[in-house]
Amino acid sequence: MVRINENFIKIPATYLFSEIAKRIARHKLENPSADIIRMGIGDVTLPLPEACVEAMIKAAEEQRVSETFRGYGPEQGYDFLRRSIIENDFKALGIEADEIFVSDGAKSDTGNIGDIFSPNNKVAIANPSYPVYVDTNVMGGRAGEPTENGGWTDLIFLRCDESNGFVPELPAEPVDIIYLCYPNNPTGITLTKEQLRLWVDYARTNRAVILYDAAYEAFITEEDVPHSIYEIEGAKEVAIEFRSYSKTAGFTGMRCAYTVVPKTVMAFSESGENISLNKLWLRRHTTKFNGTSYVVQRAAEATYTPEGKEQVRNLVRYYMENARIIRQALQSVELKVFGGINSPYLWAKTPDGMNSWEYFDFLLKKKNIVCTPGAGFGSGGEGYVRFSAFGDRDRILEATERLVR
Protein backbone atom coordinates (compact mmCIF):
# COMPACT_ATOMS: atom_id res chain seq x y z
CA MET A 1 0.00 0.00 0.00
CA VAL A 2 1.50 3.30 -1.09
CA ARG A 3 1.96 5.87 1.69
CA ILE A 4 1.91 9.66 1.53
CA ASN A 5 4.17 12.20 3.18
CA GLU A 6 1.93 12.87 6.20
CA ASN A 7 3.41 16.34 6.63
CA PHE A 8 1.51 17.58 3.58
CA ILE A 9 -1.88 17.02 5.15
CA LYS A 10 -0.87 18.98 8.27
CA ILE A 11 -0.75 22.20 6.26
CA PRO A 12 -4.00 24.18 5.95
CA ALA A 13 -5.66 23.05 2.74
CA THR A 14 -6.00 26.54 1.25
CA TYR A 15 -2.94 28.57 0.32
CA LEU A 16 -3.31 32.29 1.19
CA PHE A 17 -3.45 33.58 -2.36
CA SER A 18 -5.81 30.80 -3.45
CA GLU A 19 -8.27 31.91 -0.76
CA ILE A 20 -7.96 35.50 -1.93
CA ALA A 21 -8.68 34.42 -5.50
CA LYS A 22 -11.78 32.51 -4.36
CA ARG A 23 -13.18 35.54 -2.52
CA ILE A 24 -12.56 37.79 -5.50
CA ALA A 25 -14.26 35.31 -7.84
CA ARG A 26 -17.28 35.09 -5.51
CA HIS A 27 -17.53 38.88 -5.29
CA LYS A 28 -17.28 39.20 -9.08
CA LEU A 29 -19.99 36.59 -9.56
CA GLU A 30 -22.29 38.50 -7.22
CA ASN A 31 -21.32 41.87 -8.71
CA PRO A 32 -20.57 41.34 -12.43
CA SER A 33 -20.03 45.05 -13.09
CA ALA A 34 -17.61 45.55 -10.19
CA ASP A 35 -14.42 47.36 -11.24
CA ILE A 36 -11.91 45.56 -9.04
CA ILE A 37 -8.47 47.05 -8.46
CA ARG A 38 -5.89 44.56 -7.26
CA MET A 39 -3.35 45.80 -4.73
CA GLY A 40 -2.69 42.46 -3.10
CA ILE A 41 -0.55 39.86 -4.83
CA GLY A 42 2.81 41.29 -5.84
CA ASP A 43 2.63 40.66 -9.58
CA VAL A 44 4.11 43.36 -11.77
CA THR A 45 2.17 45.34 -14.39
CA LEU A 46 4.78 47.14 -16.50
CA PRO A 47 6.20 45.40 -19.58
CA LEU A 48 9.67 43.92 -19.64
CA PRO A 49 12.65 46.25 -20.17
CA GLU A 50 13.27 46.77 -23.87
CA ALA A 51 16.85 45.53 -23.51
CA CYS A 52 15.56 42.20 -22.18
CA VAL A 53 13.06 41.78 -25.00
CA GLU A 54 15.71 42.50 -27.63
CA ALA A 55 18.06 40.01 -25.98
CA MET A 56 15.36 37.33 -26.03
CA ILE A 57 14.58 37.96 -29.69
CA LYS A 58 18.25 37.62 -30.58
CA ALA A 59 18.58 34.47 -28.47
CA ALA A 60 15.49 32.96 -30.07
CA GLU A 61 16.87 33.68 -33.53
CA GLU A 62 20.03 31.80 -32.56
CA GLN A 63 17.89 28.71 -32.04
CA ARG A 64 17.06 28.69 -35.77
CA VAL A 65 20.68 27.98 -36.73
CA SER A 66 22.65 24.80 -36.07
CA GLU A 67 25.83 26.69 -35.21
CA THR A 68 24.17 28.71 -32.43
CA PHE A 69 21.43 26.31 -31.36
CA ARG A 70 21.51 25.30 -27.68
CA GLY A 71 19.86 22.33 -26.02
CA TYR A 72 20.57 21.42 -22.43
CA GLY A 73 22.55 24.12 -20.71
CA PRO A 74 24.55 23.96 -17.47
CA GLU A 75 22.19 23.41 -14.55
CA GLN A 76 23.99 26.05 -12.49
CA GLY A 77 23.50 28.70 -15.17
CA TYR A 78 25.43 29.86 -18.22
CA ASP A 79 28.81 31.45 -17.58
CA PHE A 80 27.80 34.68 -19.31
CA LEU A 81 25.07 35.31 -16.73
CA ARG A 82 27.04 34.17 -13.72
CA ARG A 83 29.93 36.43 -14.69
CA SER A 84 27.55 39.37 -15.09
CA ILE A 85 26.09 38.68 -11.66
CA ILE A 86 29.52 38.63 -10.04
CA GLU A 87 30.66 41.78 -11.85
CA ASN A 88 27.54 43.82 -11.11
CA ASP A 89 26.04 42.49 -7.88
CA PHE A 90 28.99 41.18 -5.88
CA LYS A 91 32.14 42.73 -7.35
CA ALA A 92 33.53 43.96 -4.03
CA LEU A 93 32.13 41.16 -1.85
CA GLY A 94 34.36 38.25 -2.84
CA ILE A 95 31.68 35.96 -4.26
CA GLU A 96 32.86 33.58 -7.00
CA ALA A 97 31.06 32.32 -10.10
CA ASP A 98 30.81 28.73 -8.86
CA GLU A 99 28.94 30.03 -5.81
CA ILE A 100 26.11 31.32 -8.04
CA PHE A 101 23.21 29.01 -8.97
CA VAL A 102 20.72 30.34 -11.55
CA SER A 103 17.17 29.04 -11.13
CA ASP A 104 13.54 29.61 -12.12
CA GLY A 105 12.66 31.70 -9.07
CA ALA A 106 13.53 32.67 -5.51
CA LYS A 107 10.28 31.08 -4.34
CA SER A 108 11.50 27.75 -5.70
CA ASP A 109 14.91 28.08 -4.10
CA THR A 110 13.74 29.24 -0.67
CA GLY A 111 11.40 26.26 -0.68
CA ASN A 112 13.83 23.71 -2.08
CA ILE A 113 16.84 24.69 0.05
CA GLY A 114 15.40 22.57 2.85
CA ASP A 115 16.33 19.45 0.89
CA ILE A 116 19.96 19.75 2.02
CA PHE A 117 19.17 20.14 5.73
CA SER A 118 18.31 17.50 8.33
CA PRO A 119 14.69 17.35 9.52
CA ASN A 120 16.13 17.56 13.04
CA ASN A 121 17.32 21.16 12.67
CA LYS A 122 15.66 23.80 14.84
CA VAL A 123 14.28 26.52 12.55
CA ALA A 124 13.53 30.18 13.38
CA ILE A 125 11.15 32.22 11.20
CA ALA A 126 9.85 35.76 11.65
CA ASN A 127 6.16 36.14 12.44
CA PRO A 128 4.67 37.45 10.15
CA SER A 129 6.57 36.04 7.18
CA TYR A 130 6.29 34.84 3.59
CA PRO A 131 4.20 31.61 3.85
CA VAL A 132 6.62 29.49 1.80
CA TYR A 133 9.20 29.48 4.62
CA VAL A 134 6.80 27.87 7.06
CA ASP A 135 4.96 25.56 4.67
CA THR A 136 8.07 24.00 3.14
CA ASN A 137 9.50 23.29 6.58
CA VAL A 138 6.23 21.58 7.44
CA MET A 139 6.61 19.51 4.27
CA GLY A 140 10.20 18.69 5.22
CA GLY A 141 9.25 17.42 8.68
CA ARG A 142 10.91 20.19 10.69
CA ALA A 143 7.76 21.91 11.98
CA GLY A 144 6.22 19.34 14.31
CA GLU A 145 2.49 19.65 14.85
CA PRO A 146 0.13 22.59 14.30
CA THR A 147 -0.97 24.57 17.36
CA GLU A 148 -4.29 26.26 18.09
CA ASN A 149 -2.91 29.76 17.46
CA GLY A 150 -1.67 28.88 13.98
CA GLY A 151 1.88 28.07 15.02
CA TRP A 152 3.90 24.86 14.98
CA THR A 153 5.35 23.00 17.93
CA ASP A 154 8.89 22.66 16.55
CA LEU A 155 9.30 26.04 14.82
CA ILE A 156 10.64 29.07 16.65
CA PHE A 157 8.62 32.13 15.67
CA LEU A 158 10.38 35.47 16.04
CA ARG A 159 7.92 38.14 17.14
CA CYS A 160 7.71 41.14 14.80
CA ASP A 161 5.25 43.81 15.87
CA GLU A 162 4.95 47.51 16.57
CA SER A 163 6.69 47.18 19.93
CA ASN A 164 9.96 46.15 18.26
CA GLY A 165 9.45 48.05 15.01
CA PHE A 166 8.79 44.75 13.21
CA VAL A 167 12.48 43.90 13.66
CA PRO A 168 12.82 40.38 15.10
CA GLU A 169 14.82 39.86 18.27
CA LEU A 170 17.50 37.19 18.56
CA PRO A 171 16.02 33.84 19.62
CA ALA A 172 16.10 33.05 23.32
CA GLU A 173 17.22 29.49 22.59
CA PRO A 174 19.81 28.15 20.13
CA VAL A 175 18.53 27.54 16.61
CA ASP A 176 20.17 26.00 13.55
CA ILE A 177 18.45 27.68 10.58
CA ILE A 178 17.24 31.29 10.47
CA TYR A 179 15.05 32.78 7.74
CA LEU A 180 15.53 36.52 7.19
CA CYS A 181 13.87 38.51 4.39
CA TYR A 182 14.94 42.13 3.82
CA PRO A 183 13.46 44.34 2.55
CA ASN A 184 10.77 42.35 4.29
CA ASN A 185 7.77 40.70 2.74
CA PRO A 186 5.12 41.44 4.01
CA THR A 187 5.96 44.39 6.31
CA GLY A 188 8.26 46.38 4.00
CA ILE A 189 10.68 46.92 6.91
CA THR A 190 14.46 46.83 6.46
CA LEU A 191 17.47 46.23 8.72
CA THR A 192 20.44 48.54 9.11
CA LYS A 193 23.92 47.09 8.81
CA GLU A 194 24.28 47.09 12.59
CA GLN A 195 21.00 45.24 13.04
CA LEU A 196 21.99 42.64 10.45
CA ARG A 197 25.43 42.27 12.02
CA LEU A 198 23.78 41.02 15.22
CA TRP A 199 22.30 38.12 13.26
CA VAL A 200 25.56 37.25 11.53
CA ASP A 201 27.37 37.27 14.87
CA TYR A 202 24.63 35.08 16.37
CA ALA A 203 24.92 32.58 13.53
CA ARG A 204 28.71 32.43 13.84
CA THR A 205 28.52 31.93 17.61
CA ASN A 206 25.85 29.24 17.41
CA ARG A 207 27.09 27.55 14.21
CA ALA A 208 23.77 28.33 12.55
CA VAL A 209 22.92 29.16 8.92
CA ILE A 210 21.00 32.25 7.78
CA LEU A 211 18.77 31.88 4.72
CA TYR A 212 18.63 35.48 3.50
CA ASP A 213 15.89 36.38 1.03
CA ALA A 214 16.96 39.60 -0.73
CA ALA A 215 14.40 39.47 -3.54
CA TYR A 216 13.51 43.18 -3.07
CA GLU A 217 16.98 44.67 -2.58
CA ALA A 218 16.68 46.84 -5.71
CA PHE A 219 13.98 48.90 -3.98
CA ILE A 220 16.28 50.08 -1.18
CA THR A 221 16.63 53.87 -1.10
CA GLU A 222 18.36 54.56 2.23
CA GLU A 223 22.15 54.41 2.53
CA ASP A 224 22.57 52.43 5.75
CA VAL A 225 20.44 49.54 4.50
CA PRO A 226 22.55 46.64 3.13
CA HIS A 227 21.66 45.25 -0.30
CA SER A 228 23.39 41.95 0.46
CA ILE A 229 24.09 40.11 3.69
CA TYR A 230 27.65 39.66 2.43
CA GLU A 231 28.27 43.33 3.16
CA ILE A 232 28.52 42.16 6.78
CA GLU A 233 31.87 40.75 7.86
CA GLY A 234 31.73 37.00 8.44
CA ALA A 235 28.48 36.46 6.55
CA LYS A 236 30.21 34.31 3.92
CA GLU A 237 30.72 31.73 6.67
CA VAL A 238 27.06 31.49 7.69
CA ALA A 239 24.67 32.84 5.03
CA ILE A 240 22.96 31.73 1.82
CA GLU A 241 21.38 34.57 -0.17
CA PHE A 242 18.45 34.46 -2.62
CA ARG A 243 18.00 37.04 -5.40
CA SER A 244 15.31 37.45 -8.05
CA TYR A 245 14.66 39.28 -11.32
CA SER A 246 10.90 38.97 -10.85
CA LYS A 247 10.12 42.34 -9.29
CA THR A 248 13.19 44.33 -10.30
CA ALA A 249 12.96 43.55 -14.02
CA GLY A 250 9.38 42.30 -14.34
CA PHE A 251 10.31 38.61 -14.70
CA THR A 252 7.35 37.23 -12.75
CA GLY A 253 6.22 35.31 -15.82
CA MET A 254 9.71 34.75 -17.23
CA ARG A 255 11.02 32.96 -14.14
CA CYS A 256 14.66 33.68 -13.37
CA ALA A 257 16.53 34.10 -10.11
CA TYR A 258 19.73 32.96 -8.49
CA THR A 259 20.99 31.70 -5.16
CA VAL A 260 24.40 32.42 -3.67
CA VAL A 261 25.96 29.57 -1.67
CA PRO A 262 29.52 30.44 -0.61
CA LYS A 263 31.84 27.47 -0.38
CA THR A 264 32.76 28.63 3.12
CA VAL A 265 29.25 28.01 4.52
CA MET A 266 29.45 24.76 6.45
CA ALA A 267 27.05 22.40 8.18
CA PHE A 268 27.69 19.17 9.99
CA SER A 269 27.07 15.48 9.42
CA GLU A 270 25.76 13.22 12.20
CA SER A 271 29.37 12.29 12.94
CA GLY A 272 30.36 15.95 13.29
CA GLU A 273 32.17 16.27 9.96
CA ASN A 274 32.20 19.73 8.34
CA ILE A 275 30.37 19.65 4.98
CA SER A 276 30.26 22.51 2.48
CA LEU A 277 26.65 23.46 1.71
CA ASN A 278 27.80 24.61 -1.72
CA LYS A 279 28.69 21.01 -2.51
CA LEU A 280 25.32 19.73 -1.29
CA TRP A 281 23.30 22.39 -3.13
CA LEU A 282 25.26 21.67 -6.32
CA ARG A 283 24.30 18.00 -6.00
CA ARG A 284 20.66 18.80 -5.33
CA HIS A 285 20.48 21.46 -8.06
CA THR A 286 22.03 19.31 -10.77
CA THR A 287 19.94 16.28 -9.81
CA LYS A 288 16.49 17.90 -9.65
CA PHE A 289 16.80 20.85 -12.04
CA ASN A 290 17.68 21.01 -15.75
CA GLY A 291 18.50 24.69 -15.83
CA THR A 292 16.78 27.97 -16.70
CA SER A 293 16.19 28.44 -20.41
CA TYR A 294 18.93 30.00 -22.51
CA VAL A 295 16.58 32.67 -23.88
CA VAL A 296 15.55 33.77 -20.37
CA GLN A 297 19.16 33.85 -19.16
CA ARG A 298 20.08 36.14 -22.06
CA ALA A 299 17.24 38.42 -20.99
CA ALA A 300 18.56 38.42 -17.42
CA GLU A 301 22.05 39.21 -18.68
CA ALA A 302 20.63 42.22 -20.53
CA THR A 303 19.57 43.81 -17.24
CA TYR A 304 23.28 44.45 -16.61
CA THR A 305 23.90 46.38 -19.84
CA PRO A 306 23.94 50.20 -19.55
CA GLU A 307 20.55 50.37 -21.28
CA GLY A 308 19.15 47.53 -19.20
CA LYS A 309 20.30 49.06 -15.93
CA GLU A 310 18.60 52.37 -16.72
CA GLN A 311 15.40 50.64 -17.81
CA VAL A 312 15.33 48.57 -14.61
CA ARG A 313 15.92 51.70 -12.53
CA ASN A 314 12.95 53.30 -14.28
CA LEU A 315 10.75 50.33 -13.36
CA VAL A 316 11.84 50.56 -9.74
CA ARG A 317 11.23 54.33 -9.65
CA TYR A 318 7.75 53.84 -11.08
CA TYR A 319 6.73 51.29 -8.46
CA MET A 320 8.28 53.27 -5.62
CA GLU A 321 6.33 56.34 -6.68
CA ASN A 322 3.24 54.13 -6.51
CA ALA A 323 4.29 53.19 -2.99
CA ARG A 324 4.59 56.86 -2.04
CA ILE A 325 1.10 57.57 -3.39
CA ILE A 326 -0.42 54.62 -1.50
CA ARG A 327 1.40 55.51 1.71
CA GLN A 328 0.17 59.11 1.54
CA ALA A 329 -3.42 58.00 0.92
CA LEU A 330 -3.42 55.51 3.81
CA GLN A 331 -2.00 58.10 6.15
CA SER A 332 -4.60 60.64 5.02
CA VAL A 333 -7.35 58.34 6.33
CA GLU A 334 -5.39 57.96 9.57
CA LEU A 335 -4.22 54.41 9.12
CA LYS A 336 -0.90 53.53 10.72
CA VAL A 337 1.43 52.53 7.88
CA PHE A 338 4.84 50.84 7.73
CA GLY A 339 7.13 50.11 4.77
CA GLY A 340 6.89 51.65 1.32
CA ILE A 341 10.21 53.50 1.67
CA ASN A 342 12.75 50.77 0.90
CA SER A 343 10.15 48.33 -0.33
CA PRO A 344 7.20 48.06 -2.76
CA TYR A 345 5.04 46.73 0.08
CA LEU A 346 3.08 48.73 2.64
CA TRP A 347 1.89 47.23 5.92
CA ALA A 348 -1.18 48.96 7.34
CA LYS A 349 -2.92 48.49 10.66
CA THR A 350 -6.61 47.74 10.22
CA PRO A 351 -9.07 50.35 11.53
CA ASP A 352 -11.71 50.09 14.23
CA GLY A 353 -10.45 46.81 15.65
CA MET A 354 -11.24 44.85 12.48
CA ASN A 355 -9.30 41.65 11.95
CA SER A 356 -7.34 41.16 8.73
CA TRP A 357 -9.97 39.22 6.79
CA GLU A 358 -12.76 41.56 7.93
CA TYR A 359 -10.90 44.55 6.55
CA PHE A 360 -10.04 42.60 3.38
CA ASP A 361 -13.75 41.88 2.86
CA PHE A 362 -14.69 45.49 3.64
CA LEU A 363 -12.29 46.84 1.01
CA LEU A 364 -13.35 44.24 -1.54
CA LYS A 365 -17.10 44.61 -1.06
CA LYS A 366 -17.32 48.36 -0.36
CA LYS A 367 -14.41 49.76 -2.40
CA ASN A 368 -13.69 46.99 -4.96
CA ILE A 369 -10.07 47.02 -3.79
CA VAL A 370 -8.01 43.89 -3.16
CA CYS A 371 -5.29 43.86 -0.49
CA THR A 372 -3.65 40.93 1.29
CA PRO A 373 -4.82 39.99 4.82
CA GLY A 374 -1.93 40.09 7.25
CA ALA A 375 -3.18 36.98 9.06
CA GLY A 376 -2.22 34.99 5.97
CA PHE A 377 1.43 35.65 6.85
CA GLY A 378 1.12 34.17 10.34
CA SER A 379 -0.51 35.04 13.64
CA GLY A 380 1.78 38.07 13.92
CA GLY A 381 0.07 39.56 10.88
CA GLU A 382 -3.38 39.62 12.44
CA GLY A 383 -4.78 43.14 12.53
CA TYR A 384 -2.79 44.25 9.46
CA VAL A 385 -3.11 44.16 5.69
CA ARG A 386 -0.48 44.40 2.97
CA PHE A 387 -0.74 46.68 -0.03
CA SER A 388 1.40 46.12 -3.13
CA ALA A 389 2.76 48.98 -5.24
CA PHE A 390 3.10 46.80 -8.36
CA GLY A 391 0.10 48.29 -10.10
CA ASP A 392 -0.68 50.55 -13.02
CA ARG A 393 -0.37 54.21 -11.98
CA ASP A 394 -3.85 55.22 -13.11
CA ARG A 395 -5.37 52.27 -11.25
CA ILE A 396 -3.33 53.11 -8.15
CA LEU A 397 -4.63 56.68 -8.27
CA GLU A 398 -8.19 55.45 -8.69
CA ALA A 399 -7.76 53.05 -5.74
CA THR A 400 -6.39 55.75 -3.47
CA GLU A 401 -9.30 58.04 -4.38
CA ARG A 402 -11.68 55.24 -3.36
CA LEU A 403 -9.79 54.77 -0.10
CA VAL A 404 -10.01 58.48 0.72
CA ARG A 405 -13.70 58.61 -0.18
Image: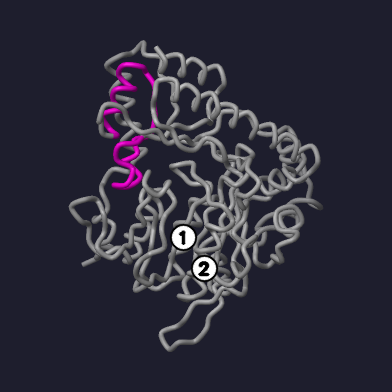
Q: Is residue 332 above or below residue 61?
A: above
Q: What amino acid type should be assigned to the residue bearing mark 2?
A: Arg
Q: Quadrant of residue 177?
A: bottom left
Please provide percent x and percent y for residue 96: 71, 66
Q: Is residue 337 above or below residue 172?
A: above
Which region is colored magenta?
Answer: 356-384
Instruction: Identify the image's colour scheme: rainbow, by chain, secondary structure or one colour.
Output: one colour
Q: Quadrant of residue 120?
A: bottom left
Q: What amino acid type should be assigned to the residue bearing mark 1?
A: Asn
Q: Main secondary structure of the magenta part?
A: helix
Please provide percent x and percent y for residue 189: 49, 44
Apparent side of residue 92 relative to residue 74 in the rendered image (left or right): right
Please provide percent x and percent y for residue 375: 31, 41
Q: How many marks?
A: 2
- Asked whether disc 1 touches disc 2, contact meaning CB atoms under 8 Å apart, the reply is yes
Q: Residue at x 45, y 59 (%)?
A: 179
- Element type at mark 2: helix
The residue at which mark 1 appears reads as: 112
Q: Is residue 307 above or below residue 318?
A: below
The residue at which mark 2 appears reads as: 284
Depth check, front residue: 344 or 286: 344
Please provide percent x and percent y for residue 137: 36, 61
Query: Could you classify mark 2 by the number of other residues whose Cα lies within 10 Å: few (under 14), some (14-19), or many (20 or more)?
Result: some
Apparent side of residue 177 relative to residue 366 in the rendered image (left or right): right
Q: CA distance from mark 1 to mark 2?
A: 9 Å
Q: Residue at x 54, y 23 (%)?
A: 325
Q: Quadrant of the N terminus?
A: bottom left
